[in-house]
Image (cartoon, helix red, strand yellow):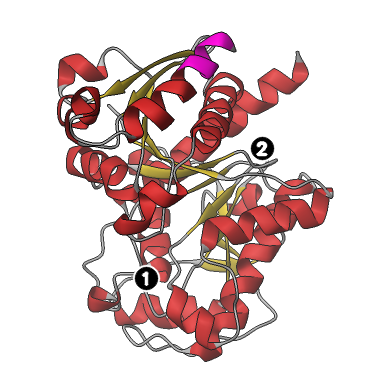
Amino acid sequence: MTALALSVGDPSGIGPEIAIAAFLAREAVGLPAFYLLADPALIASRASQVGVSVPMVETTPAQAAQVFAHTLPIVPLAARFIDSPGRPDPANAAGTIEAIDRAVAACLTGDAAAVVTCPIAKKPLYDAGFRFPGHTEYLAHLAALHSGVEVMPVMMLAGPDLRTVPVTIHIALADVPKVLTTELIVATARITAADLVGRFGIARPRLAIAGLNPHAGEGGSMGLEDERIVRPAVDILRADGIDAFGPLPADTLFHPRARAGYDAALCMYHDQALIPAKALAFDEAVNVTLGLPFIRTSPDHGTAFDIAGKGIARPDSLIAALKLARRLADIDKKAAAL
């Protein structure tokens, strides 16, 4: 079986220690095989700092699955890291980016089954000259670089009981009405529906479309965006044969009975999507990037610099991300074989 490629993330954050913790829990939680793209010296140092012993071996992507049962496979980076838990350093940017680059390249050549990424922090990358808004946009750039085809990445938070997709993501709330368009909602929903079919194996996905305003605008009395922007998008999607419905009031969209009626909820802005996803399953939710020519998952949390190196970071969300990546890769492989 081809292993998953796990990038180490920002080495000053909790990425190294949750990768170690996930590996040490591999038998107890039934973890699929992965290899870690990292500086081996950094991983050894962090294991010592958090007081655990972990067997490690430098290997190649092709050999990783064979050794995973007994040792943590590490594919070493050319860059070396400064080990400074809790203190992000722009000097680590080169290795952080190299790990992502090599994970994507391995996935596109078939040397890895999927890409799983530990969290990165934007500021140390920006300080080192990184010019992409974030992880997701950089992954889309890499996909286009390798394939020659521009892609539109879509962020999904997937938990045991809820999948949410923010149509607008990392922008100020005041800018959302300016950015939100019927075309953007339609494009996001089409990609979401296609990946729910092709990668999640849902034959006819049901998409609940949240309204932007309280009570979905209440007929225009609380804002006109829902009638002028959101509702036309729903009409276009339904004409396309996609089972979309809305705009729906967001304050009644996430209780258990409502969740039973859809496979994913499209939300108009970041917090509308992420608050319910994290409130319901903070330790189990997974960030999935849709619309890419490879599978990518990630924990739903950040670098947690405040607890890095203290040995208290929980690997639950990373474990969920690894398991989901494996499941999506297996579905993808079966679909390709048909």
Toward the viewer: 287 or 251? 251
Q: Amino acid at mark 2?
A: Met
Q: Is residue 126 left or right of residue 162?
A: right
Q: Main secondary structure of the magenta part?
A: helix
Q: Quadrant of the N terminus?
A: top right
The boundaries of the magenta stretch are 235-239
Which mark is drawn over residue 1? 2
Q: Residue at x 34, y 19 (%)?
A: 246
Up-down relation of residue 118 to residue 68 (above or below): below
Report x, y in % for residue 88: 40, 85
Residue underneath mark 1: 53
**Residue 261 located within the stretch drawn in magenta:** no
> Can residue 138 be seen at all in this image of the molecule?
yes
Q: Label 2: how many residues lie within 10 Å, few (<14), some (14-19) or many (20+)?
A: few
Toward the viewer: 200 or 204? 204
Which mark is drawn over residue 155? none
Toward the viewer: 329 or 210? 210
